[in-house]
């Protein structure tokens, strides 16, 4: 069977990871799901997010995906361990705040982390801090409303600037020299983060490192990499890349050029009793 990589997020944030995967594995087919009906995940209970992640995973496996990327820090915190237990035949790659490189590179000994409340509350984040960053000062901010601004395509609006200024200016005053992005959405406002944080502050986006891990896992576990794509899949069409949204697909389609420089046909998925159902074609 032809191989596909499944990628999902609560919304558009995971597209920052998807673009890096395309660069790392340019000939690989992908299937992207934006669960925009439930965005943002970061303010929701972890148990609820885990149920969303399980439903999406079931759909991606049925769609023929043989490797799944949880391109969302909150969903990774809520469900990555659970998904690996439930689907042992499927390799998963998830997100975690890049505190290890931040702790290694900081010269001031102070690091800022921008992430959602659920990410900060998760055991995964606590483990990363304990393993790699216990010796540095960490300044955290949840940036309330920032995900919604990015979902609306407001990457440099007055409100977006205000949210980031309230997070970054106090951090800079406290001596941080590195900012870690703990939400995939935030990659789309890196230019604004750099502008507000000022010169001398490093911004670490984990997406390239995640793509490298995807490439490594793909090589280890996914066979027949040179196979011609002729096998039909259970869901969707035989296209190199497929895109789905659980809300208005036109919303994601309209944002695609702004975020990726490309156009995309986005199809609708409906949640029905905890499962995803594709809208019939035609």
Image (tube, rainbow, N blue to C red):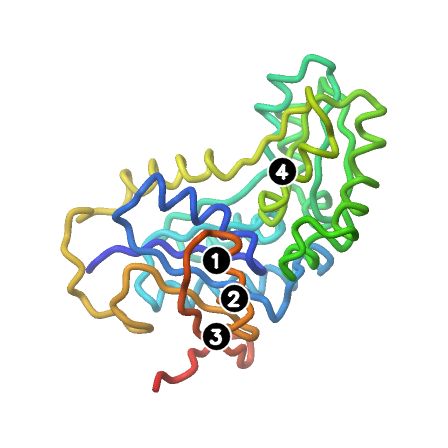
Task: Tell me which residue sits at (61%, 17%) in the image.
Answer: 105
Q: Is residue 242 visible?
A: yes
CA separation in Å, label 4 and label 1: 17 Å
Q: Residue 191: which disc?
A: 4
Under tag 1, what secondary structure?
A: helix
The residue that label 2 is drawn on is: 254
Return the x and y of residue 170 as percentages of the image width and height. 85, 31
The residue that label 3 is drawn on is: 276
Q: Nearer the viewer, residue 264 or 84?
A: 264
How crowded pointer 1 is (Cα within 10 Å; few <14, some 14-19, many 20+) is rated as few
The answer to whether the residue labelled 2 contacts the one labelled 1, judged by CB atoms less than 8 Å apart, is yes
Specify which label sits upstream in the sequence, 2 or 3.
2
Looking at the picture, does residue 58 appear above or below residue 259? below
The residue that label 1 is drawn on is: 257
* Relative to 118, 167 lies left or right: right
Task: Tell me which residue sits at (78%, 51%) in the image.
Answer: 158
């Amino acid at each position: 069977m032809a191989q596909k990589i499944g990628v999902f997020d609560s919304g558009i944030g995971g597209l920052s990871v998807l673009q890096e995967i395309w660069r790392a594995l340019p000939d690989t087919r992908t299937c992207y799901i934006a669960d925009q009906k439930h965005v943002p995940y970061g303010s929701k209970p972890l148990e609820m997010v885990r149920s969303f992640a399980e439903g999406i995973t079931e759909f991606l496996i049925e769609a023929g995906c043989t490797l799944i990327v949880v391109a969302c820090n909150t969903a990774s915190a809520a469900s990555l361990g659970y998904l690996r237990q439930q689907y042992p035949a499927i390799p998963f790659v998830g997100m975690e705040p890049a505190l290890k490189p931040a702790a290694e590179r900081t010269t001031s000994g102070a690091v800022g982390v921008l992430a959602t409340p659920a990410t900060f509350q998760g055991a995964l984040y606590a483990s990363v801090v304990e393993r790699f960053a216990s010796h540095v000062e960490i300044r955290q901010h949840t940036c309330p409303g920032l995900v919604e601004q990015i979902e609306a395509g407001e990457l440099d609006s007055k409100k977006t600037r205000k949210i980031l200024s309230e997070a970054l200016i106090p951090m800079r005053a406290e001596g941080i020299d590195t900012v870690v992005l703990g939400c995939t959405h935030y990659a789309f406002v890196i230019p604004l983060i750099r502008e507000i944080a000022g010169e001398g502050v490093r911004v670490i986006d984990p997406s390239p490192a995640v793509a490298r891990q995807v490439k490594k896992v793909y090589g280890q576990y996914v066979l027949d990499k040179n196979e011609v794509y002729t096998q039909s899949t259970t869901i969707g069409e035989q296209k190199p890349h497929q895109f789905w949204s659980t809300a208005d697909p036109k919303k994601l389609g309209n944002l695609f050029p702004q975020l990726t420089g490309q156009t995309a046909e986005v199809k609708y998925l409906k949640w029905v009793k905890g499962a995803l159902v594709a809208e019939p074609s035609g």
